Amino acid sequence: MPAVPPTRRCGTCRKRPPLDCRLRRPGNLGPVSYPLENALFQWEEGRRALQAIEDPRQRRLADRVVDALREELRRRIGPTFSAAELAELYGQGTDWAQQVALDVAPSIDSDSQALADAAFWLYLRGATDFAGGRQLPV
């Protein structure tokens, strides 16, 4: 019968380290938040793509999608939030946003990510620490 290797113990509490204890070890950064600057760049690109839609029918459809996405953002993050919190939600993934876009307008398939980015940009205006393109010191 093979020998069972000894379990590693925490240097601080001498118990088997739980996940939060392992995350505090040197060399393990743990979860990293999504950079706000990256999110802003992508959201601004989405806003530009939304503004570039010239066909009135396509624009009405895109506006309906963006409105539905803003409602979903309100449900997910609430009315009081910071720009960093919104970027963190964005960093967790936007599959749900693309699904909302496809539910509202199945024909908008190729532009769903750009519309999601535009919706995040428009919702960002309500952040407690954001004012028209610059972050406010809080």
Image: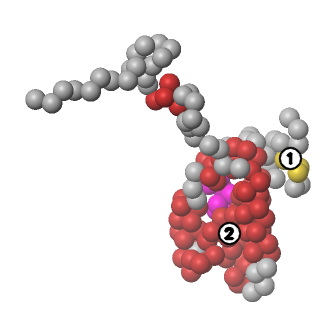
- What residue did someone put label 2 on? 115
Magenta stretch encompasses residue 67: yes
Q: Residue at x 53, y 69 (%)?
A: 103
Give, as a single range, the part of the protein colored magenta: 66-74
Residue 3 falls in image quadrant = top left
Q: Amino acid at mark 1?
A: Gln
38 vs 14, left or right, is right
Estimate the x, y position of residue 18 in percent, counting from the top left: 44, 25
Residue at the limit of the structure toward the top, as seen here: 13
Magenta stretch encompasses residue 122: no
- What residue did someone put label 1 on? 135
Q: Residue at x 79, y 79 (%)?
A: 52
Q: Amino acid at mark 2?
A: Leu
Quarter of the picture containing the N terminus is top left
Vertical placement of residue 46 versus 33, above or below: below
Residue 133 falls in image quadrant = bottom right
CA gap, disc 1 to disc 2? 23 Å
Vertical placement of residue 12 versus 78, above or below: above
Quarter of the picture containing the C terminus is top right
Judged by its main secondary structure, the magenta piece is helix
Residue at the limit of the structure toward the left, as seen here: 1
Q: Number of labelled discs?
A: 2
The one nearer the camera, 130 or 36, is 36
Neighbour tally class for label 1: few under 14, some 14-19, many 20 plus, Cα within 10 Å = some
Estimate the x, y position of residue 5 in percent, counting from the top left: 27, 27
Kindly tell me whether residue 25 is visible in this rendering. yes
> Which structural element holds mark 2?
helix
Estimate the x, y position of residue 84 in percent, counting from the top left: 73, 44
Question: Mark 1 vs mark 2: which is more N-terminal?
Answer: 2
